[in-house]
Image: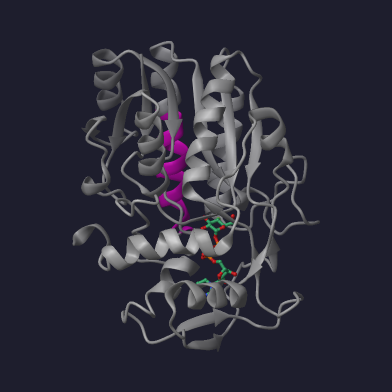
Amino acid sequence: MAILVCGGAGYIGAHAVHQLTAKGEKVVIIDNLQTGHRKAINPAAKFYEGDIRNCDVLKKIFTENKIEAVIHFAANSIVSESVKNPLKYFNNNVYGMQVLLESMVNFGVDKIVFSSTAATYGEPEKIPISEKDKTAPTNPYGESKLMMEKMIKWIPNLRYVSLRYFNAAGAIESGSIGEDHQPETHLIPLILQVPLGKRDHITIFGNDYPTPDGTCLRDYVHVIDLADAHILALNHLREGGESDIFNLGSGQGFSVKEIIAAAEKVTGQNIKTEIGERRAGDPAQLIAASDKARKILKWTPQFTNIEKIIETAWKWHKNHPNGYED
Ligand code: UFG
């Protein structure tokens, strides 16, 4: 039996495939390579280039392979883009989920681990954010992921785990795969472009937030720890565990300024900064309570030090300054 990884050529998907194959799991990947990268595809996995909205491709995959469970990463995930083009998000993310679920039902596949997001909560009412807190997304991206979670829950005989990630960061320690978004919008890869000589400075989006140093606090979690949580979630379902939703974060918040200082330490270079306007829709703080994942899934993140997390990202970016294009 194999695990179907939707979006296995993307940033988090590729790291999950690495961890799955390293544990001896048989993996089949579907990816339309819209944001994923051919070079990120693990050679130990069987790859289908295709779109999850195409039921014929899914039919072919489910017919040609014995699929035990699905891990679903295939979605668009840029908040600002989702505000400009919400229907792209409802089409690819929500409709994509519908077609995937229809195919799973048709082929009797009854387990799914879903890649969700802290963006489902919106502006938090309290910190740290727990799974019981109100979900009120402030952008179409978060809304689409919440809709996807809600769709899964209504399918009879389907068991699921939704994993709400906070800020995914870092890369596999060997530096062979890593983060490569076009365009890049995330803080850590953008900061590292300064010591790489690819940008002159990093703009800090607002320094007048109600936080200790005035810049936003985020909860950074290493991509390998995220990948491992998917395997634990899969095993939880295999062992008959209940369908559930879990936050994945370190429980610790770092400010934008603290991340820049840590990157200076890791790279040994000064990183020039400029203060810019606040970015629309950025909450002052997003910090997870992830004790539930630790307790029920027995998730124990290995990367608890922010410098170590940035060190792994630095290794990837230094060796691949142009991402997978090198
Ligand atoms: N930031 C800057 N300058 C930059 C880029 C980012 O100051 O050039 C700041 C942002 O304002 C924010 C922090 O750095 O305060 C982190 O920003 P990211 O864009 O790296 O990440 P976000 O917290 O905005 O987004 C992440 C995920 C989203 C998810 C969101 C909420 O990438 O998918 O968390 O869960 F929706």
Name the quarter where the N terminus is drawn.
top left
Q: Is residue 299 above or below residue 190?
A: above
Residue lying farthest to the left in this orientation: 326
Task: Tell me: 234 left or right of 171.
Answer: right
Quadrant containing ligand 1 reads: bottom right
Q: Which of 214/317 is in front?
A: 317
Q: Is residue 291 above or below residue 318?
A: above
Name the quarter where the C terminus is drawn.
bottom left
Q: Is residue 158 above or below residue 161?
A: above
x%, y% of residue 134? 76, 46
User: Magenta segment, which residues?
Assistant: 82-99
x%, y% of residue 62? 31, 17
Task: Tell me: 129 left or right of 226.
Answer: right
Q: Is residue 311 above or below residue 263?
A: above
Q: Name the dominant secondary structure of the magenta segment.
A: helix
Q: Is residue 326 visible?
A: yes
x%, y% of residue 280? 59, 72
Q: Which of 265/283 is in front?
A: 265
Does 317 appear in magenta?
no
x%, y% of residue 160? 57, 25
Does 95 appear in magenta?
yes
